[in-house]
Image: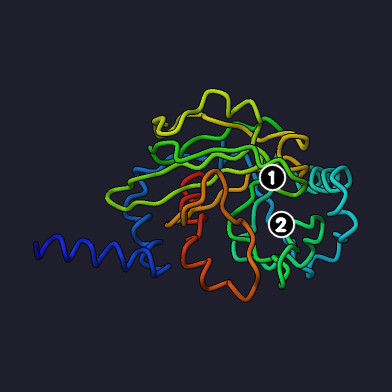
Amino acid sequence: MHNLNKTFTAIQMIKTDALAFKKYVKENSGQIGKVVDFDPDSDKLLNFDFTDNNKKLSPETVADTTLFSKWINGELTVNNCRYGIGGYDEHRTLYARSVLFDNAAEARRLHLGVDIWGPALTPVYNPIAGHVHSFNFNNHFGDYGATIILEHDFEGLKFHSLYGHLSLASLNSLTIGKFIPKGEMFTEFGLPAENGFWPPHLHFQLIWDMQGKIGDYPGVCAFSEREKYLQNCPDPNDILACTF
């Protein structure tokens, strides 16, 4: 019983301490696979900034899917980068493109996951063996579009991973509880018409407690709720470090 209590206490610490989670992931990095294909010897990443510090990107461009897509693709091409990346704990003041983010007393602008921007149909792999928790087509402008949530037991640490803005076809073969092995390509970036009308990209988010939600979980929150949501959504960059 004493050892069980010590294990429980250690896991609770990891779930509430960002540094403890980072250390735990690093110590078990051999159990983590890639999320997208990336060759560090030949591929480059472009860090995107969607706060109002980015003077090259206007709210009008962000609001127009075609213009936004051209801007994303242009930046990747000019900088010779395979993917764009960023977003965790980013206060995206440019996000006024959808009423979805403004349907409460305080607009939702704080991003809770990491976005990986790249071509439509880019393969997405499961980095840690898990089971399908739920999936849904969240078909509203500015929403996730096709969404998959997996449930993991990672060396005794249980959490969920959310994949948003996917291809609709990738939902066809799924069932609740289906096992997805580590390293399996199980989905792909969706086209705008099926990914919530965004430029093609992956929203990757980690979640401790799904709080009863099925096929969906907030990927953006009000700034006043920052601490509450970040405590429930640890930094996905700790997992993505094994990809990049």
Callout 2: helix, strand or loop? loop
* Disc with the residue nearer the chain's start (2 vs 1): 2
Which of the 4 image quarters holds residue 197?
Answer: top right
Q: Which of the pair 120/226 is nearer the observer? A: 226
Total label count? 2
Q: Pinpoint residue 123: horizontal percent, then vertical percent.
A: 59, 31
Q: Which of the pair 59/218 is nearer the observer? A: 218
The quadrant of the picture occupied by the N terminus is: bottom left
Q: Residue at x 85, y 66 (%)?
A: 55
233 sits left or right of 196 in the view:
left
Say above or below: 76 vs 191.
below
Q: Which mark is residue 117?
A: 1
Residue beneath label 2, please?
A: 48
Callout 1: helix, strand or loop? strand
Mark 2 crowd level (few <14, some 14–19, many ≥20, 10 Å Cα): some
Q: Pinpoint residue 27: horizontal percent, then vertical percent.
A: 32, 55
Which of the 4 image quarters holds residue 132?
Answer: top left
Q: Are marks 2 and 1 in contact (CB under 8 Å)?
A: yes
Q: Which of the pair 123/39 is nearer the observer? A: 123
Mark 1 crowd level (few <14, some 14–19, many ≥20, 10 Å Cα): many
Q: Pinpoint residue 58: horizontal percent, then vertical percent.
A: 88, 61
Q: Which of the pair 191/21 is nearer the observer? A: 191
Which of the 4 image quarters holds residue 176?
Answer: top left
Say above or below: 67 vs 187.
below
Q: Residue at x 54, y 38 (%)?
A: 135
Q: Residue at x 68, y 40 (%)?
A: 145
Say above or below: 208 vs 134.
below
The Cα–Cα distance between marks 2 and 1, rounded to whole angstroms, is: 9 Å
Q: Pinpoint residue 62: horizontal percent, then vertical percent.
A: 83, 54
Identify residue type, mark 2: Phe
